[in-house]
Amino acid sequence: MDGFVTIVKLVALALGAFIVYLAYKGYRRNASRPLLYVALGFALITAGTIVEGLLYVILGSDLLGALLASTAITVVGFIAIIYSVYASK
């Protein structure tokens, strides 16, 4: 089961990194500050997923602590994405 979770986390990392790359590339091309916040938000959401796996599987943290840490990072990522929508107005 741990192997399957690791594979899913790696797929999430790859997809998240690709979205961050595309958003950052768009920011650089258009000098659009909201796209920078989109890239930051997706980077944090991706990091939250990876932090959960690192804390729980590799470092042996309890599941509740790992979920709390990943959720907090993910929430900050969502806030950055929401800010990117309202900052452009």
Image (cartoon, rainbow, N blue to C red):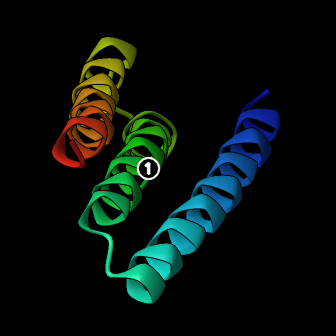
User: In screen coordinates, is 19 left or right of 83?
Assistant: right
User: Can you say whether 66 is above or below 38 in the image?
Assistant: above
Residue 60 image position (x, y, % from top left): 39, 35
Q: Residue at x 70, y 44 (%)?
A: 6
Quarter of the C terminus within the rendering = top left
x, y percent for residue 41: 34, 48
As drawn, 36 above or below 1: below
Q: Nearer the viewer, residue 54 or 25?
A: 25
Q: Residues within 10 Å of mark 1 (few under 14, many from 20)?
A: many
For badge 1, the amino acid type reads: Phe
Q: Which residue is located at x 24 percent, y 67 percent? A: 33
- Number of marks in the image? 1
Going by the picture, which residue comes out furthest to the bottom?
Answer: 29
Placement of the N terminus among the 4 image quadrants: top right
Extreme top residue here?
64
Above/below status of 44 relative to 39: above
User: Secondary structure under badge 1?
Assistant: helix
Image point 31% across, 12% down: which residue?
64
Residue 47: percent from left, percent from top: 40, 51
Q: Is residue 10 left or right of residue 21?
A: right
Foreground residue among 64 and 83: 83
Residue visible at 32% across and 71% down in the picture: 32
Label 1, on which residue? 42
- Horizontal side of 54 relative to 84 (left or right) equals right
Q: Nearer the viewer, residue 75 or 31?
A: 31
Rendering coords of residue 16 (x, y %): 59, 54
